[in-house]
Amino acid sequence: MKDFDNIPALMADLGKRAKESSRALAFASAEQKHAALIAASESAWNNRAQIIEANQKDLEFGRNKGLSPAMMDRLMLDEARIQGMVDGLRTVAEQADPVGEVLTEWDMPSGLNIQRVRTPLGVIGVIYESRPNVTADAGALCLKSGNAVILRGGSESFHSSAAIHACLVEGLKAANLPEDAIQLVPTRDRAAVQELLTLTDYVDVIVPRGGKGLVGLVQREARVPVFAHLEGIVHIYIDKAANPQKTLDVVLNAKTRRTGICGAAECLLVHQDVAETLGRDVIEALVAAGVEIHAEGALSVDGTIAATGDDWGKEFLDSIIAAKPIADVDAAIAHIQQFGSNHTDCIMTEDASTATRFFERLDSAILMHNASTQFADGGEFGMGAEIGIATGKMHARGPVGAAQLTSFKYLVRGNGTTRA
């Protein structure tokens, strides 16, 4: 039995085993990885009762901890969500294997043939909060991309993550792949996170998936490279040329479908020319849907409360939204540049030139036109699943799927070729 009192030794052991398994996984066949993911999906469905039972322990833990309704929703698993997890595993399984893909190829006058091909990163550490389905998503994507992974789920999802991880291990065993290719940190002790961030001998990249506090901690203390996944301070700008029905449909969906996910709308900017018409209609519809609105100016109607400076640039992750009138698209762009998190932002307009201006002048990882920001999801982008939405500009950006979890190497072929 491992000595969990000795967290450094525990994490070093996980790292060593992950590194060893990554070497075998790097050249595992596409057929083996496909078989492992299909077997894992079957195991998850066959063991859904046990997963839900484990999730009940986590829900009780969350209630005792005083988690908000939105965070409890993120934590909860039922048969439908397990089906979605199973579907995600199967979708990743059916995708083309990215490892070994020739990205580009050329011949040189020297006689050399040069190829740039995708190669796994090696060992990935994934640190995440609350949502237990990330265990399946991250495990699947790392496996598909030929990477070993060390998963460290949130304390709230401890039991659910363990039950899901067991299904992933069953998949590895069924495909005769190393079981240590997908490991789960078996303790809630926060010291394990600190150790994972400094395992430079074994871990090649850290992916944090969670709130600003978690991501900030990882960025401050990691000695391993980090894919930044900052909070989703998601804006919707309603232009004066917006279609009223489309706008009502999109804003309501973007805010209320699931309030606790990073693609949920958090701030509404309304062109001043339509603030008292379409803007108020949208506000009233949100109030009727039970949304708490922190509004200013012409958007302050019955049922809203006065906005304060703290409301701009805030990720509520709850049934709350900030709203303000704005002079025009350029003012909206300036507001988003000041208060946004480069995650996802949307414009509602029928004016193509205004939409183009919005797209050109903002540099969020995802920009949307007349579409709900709840589509900011790797599954909705055809990736099957995602490990998160990267908001940085180096390497991966936007939804991080299997292809984004690879690097590349150069294969250079000659025929006794020498340099003059």
Image (cartoon, helix red, strand yellow):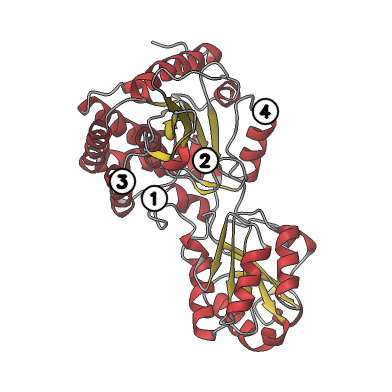
Q: Residue at x 49, y 39 (%)?
A: 156
Q: Earlier in the sequence, mark 2 or mark 1?
A: 2
Where is residue 180? Give x, y as percent.
36, 21
Can I make out residue 151 in this image? no
Label 2 to label 1: alpha-carbon separation: 21 Å
Where is residue 306? Give x, y as percent.
75, 72
* Towards the viewer: 269 or 108: 108
Q: Amino acid at mark 4?
A: Glu
Q: Residue at x 61, y 24 (%)?
A: 194
Q: Are marks 2 and 1 in contact (CB under 8 Å)?
A: no
Q: Amino acid at mark 1?
A: Met
User: In terms of image quadrants, where is residue 262?
Assistant: bottom right
- Mark drawn on residue 129: 2
Circle 2: element type:
loop
Q: Residues within 10 Å of mark 3 (few under 14, many from 20)?
A: some
Q: Are marks 4 and 2 in contact (CB under 8 Å)?
A: no
Q: Is residue 203 left or right of residue 306?
A: left
Which residue corresponds to mark 4? 221
Q: Are marks 3 and 1 in contact (CB under 8 Å)?
A: yes
* Towards the viewer: 55 or 416: 416
Which residue corresponds to mark 1? 383
Q: Is residue 169 left or right of residue 217?
A: left
In this rendering, which labeled residue sits more in front, label 1 or label 4?
1
Can I make out residue 198 in this image? yes
- Mark drawn on residue 95: 3
Q: Residues within 10 Å of mark 2 (few under 14, many from 20)?
A: many
